[in-house]
Image (tube, grey):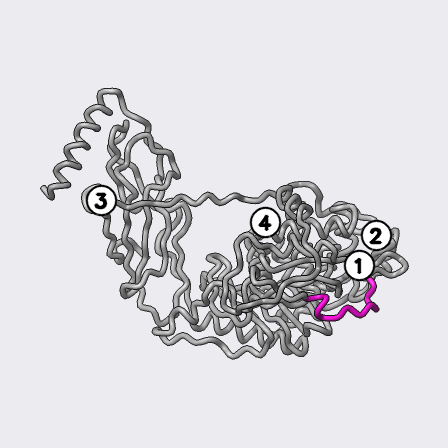
């Protein structure tokens, strides 16, 4: 979309109105800080009952810092005991009000744009969500903040952390890892690793993604963190970093355990990060089969075999939660990349079919439009008292919208407002104002405007002249002269 198809209004607030801005400082939690939060809590297993379905989560609440008493059941070999019966109410404790209700997620576009004929899809699942991965916009959802047992979709967090370690050079794909005895004694789906053998990180990753190998997951967790319990702490700390408010991990692979739960929304957030943060590793998620030690196994993700636009991700199933899938898809020639989470269906075939229906709905009824690119000059603005008379103004990230396909893009309007008169010095990236996008008078997006270049202060004489000129400029403006 080009500039000339927008109605761009530059408003000089010094002459017309005073525009006040509130600066919100967002503190980014480091992994160390998140771990500190994790271990400092005194929360116990009991949780107050949820009081409302429509409330939004408290921004300071993270389930990952709660439930310190939750421990995975172990067998005599120190492995997770798959024979242990964990009641669902213990696996998935009732959410407190701070976690928000079942629908405590951003409003879906399907509900925002009903005047354009949008509707929610009919997906047969306990909960679901569909997200545009580049913007984080929720296209459609149902009970997306409902706590459920994530089963092997848990492994997406394990893989995300492993990919972090690969990216920062802490480990390498060719590193050989000794298979611990405890991995052999861990039940459930497996890669069929032999204790004491050495396996490359690359093979273990494929064993986790394709074969959902619990033995591979345990081996990777022990290699990265020294023990499963330490790796679980890393998983919960990372959940805080990623702002997964309603998720708590107790095991590294998703076998049933007390207080091991997530939500469709949180898994959607995780799926976005898996796709966007480490794209160099994402091709493995679309791998249809893997052979190790002369044993070839197909991917549990049947969507890869039934939907040509599927790009991968992870399945999971438990007796309590049914069959679930975090999936992704992309269509040639379409800039949208979608992440779908479908939780609680009756079979692997069902979860693949419902995921395909959800992704097809997204591509058919929504489109993505980038109005302005990052660092694209939108205008030049007067700078008072600088070595240069003007500063280029634009956005520090693309202004991308997800819209119903029925929306006429020519009716989109964008307006800019500046916080105040711009005085030197101006730093590159400094916020100077805001851009607001409207459609038929309704605000649909607001983004900060920033300086695209640096402007140094002018000479003493230049600053004096600028101050005098600006004084009279404001004086005349106050009298509407």
| Residue carrying label 3 | 12
Q: Quadrant of residue 147?
A: bottom right
User: Going by the image, does 13 lie left or right of 66?
Assistant: left
Q: Which numbered disc flags the more N-terminal residue, 4 or 1?
A: 1
Indicate yes or no whether the magenta region holds residue 83. yes
Q: Which numbered disc flags the more N-terminal residue, 3 or 4?
A: 3
Indicate yes or no whether the magenta region holds residue 352. no
Residue 279: horizontal and vertical position, in percent? 58, 52
- The magenta-colored residue range is 80-92
Say what secondary structure mark 2 lies in: loop
Q: Which numbered disc flags the more N-terminal residue, 3 or 1?
A: 3
| Residue carrying label 2 | 179
Q: Is there a contact, CB below 8 Å, between mark 2 and mark 1? A: yes
Say what secondary structure mark 1 lies in: helix
| Residue carrying label 1 | 215
State which quarter of the image contains the C terminus.
top left
Q: Main secondary structure of the magenta part?
A: loop
Observer-side mark, 2 or 3, equals 3
- Residue 147, which numbered label? none
């Amino acid at each position: 979309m080009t500039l000339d198809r927008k109605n761009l209004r530059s408003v000089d607030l010094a002459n017309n109105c005073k525009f006040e801005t509130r600066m919100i400082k967002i503190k980014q939690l480091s992994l160390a800080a998140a771990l500190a939060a994790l271990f400092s809590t005194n929360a116990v297993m009991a949780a107050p009952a949820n009081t409302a379905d429509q409330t939004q989560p408290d921004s300071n609440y993270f389930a990952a810092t709660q439930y310190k008493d939750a421990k995975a059941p172990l067998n005599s070999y120190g492995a997770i005991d798959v024979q242990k019966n964990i009641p669902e109410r213990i696996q998935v404790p009732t959410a407190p009000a701070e976690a928000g209700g079942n629908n405590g997620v951003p409003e879906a576009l399907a509900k925002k744009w009903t005047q354009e004929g949008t509707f929610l899809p009919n997906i047969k699942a306990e909960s679901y969500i569909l997200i545009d991965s580049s913007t984080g916009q929720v296209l459609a959802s149902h009970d997306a903040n409902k706590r459920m047992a994530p089963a092997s979709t848990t492994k997406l967090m394990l893989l995300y952390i492993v990919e972090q370690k690969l990216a920062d050079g802490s480990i390498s794909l060719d590193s050989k890892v000794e298979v611990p005895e405890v991995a052999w004694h861990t039940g459930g789906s497996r890669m069929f690793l032999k204790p004491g053998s050495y396996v490359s990180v690359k093979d273990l990753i494929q064993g986790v993604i394709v074969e959902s190998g619990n033995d591979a997951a345990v081996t990777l967790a022990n290699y990265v963190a020294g023990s499963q319990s330490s790796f679980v702490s890393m998983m919960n700390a990372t959940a805080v970093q990623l702002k997964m408010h309603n998720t708590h991990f107790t095991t590294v692979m998703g076998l049933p355990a007390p207080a091991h739960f997530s939500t469709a929304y949180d898994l959607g957030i995780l799926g976005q990060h898996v796709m966007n943060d480490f794209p160099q590793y994402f091709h493995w998620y679309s791998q249809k089969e893997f052979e190790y030690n002369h044993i070839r196994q197909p991917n549990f993700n049947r969507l890869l075999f039934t939907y040509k636009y599927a790009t991968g991700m992870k399945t999971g199933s438990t007796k309590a939660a049914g069959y679930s899938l975090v999936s992704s898809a992309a269509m040639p020639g379409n800039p949208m990349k979608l992440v779908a989470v479908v939780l609680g269906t009756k079979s692997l075939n069902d979860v693949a079919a419902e995921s395909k229906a959800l992704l097809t709905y997204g591509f058919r009824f929504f489109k993505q439009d980038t109005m302005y690119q990052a660092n694209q000059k939108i205008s030049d603005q007067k700078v008072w008292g600088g070595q240069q008379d003007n500063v280029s103004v634009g956005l520090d990230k693309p202004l991308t919208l997800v819209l119903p396909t029925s929306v006429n893009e020519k009716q989109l309007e964008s307006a800019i407002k500046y916080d105040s008169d711009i005085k030197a010095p101006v730093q590159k990236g400094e916020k100077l104002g805001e851009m607001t996008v409207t459609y038929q008078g309704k605000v649909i997006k607001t983004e900060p405007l920033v300086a695209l270049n640096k402007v140094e202060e002018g000479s003493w004489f230049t600053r004096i002249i600028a101050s005098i000129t600006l004084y009279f400029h404001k004086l005349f403006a106050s009298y509407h002269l």
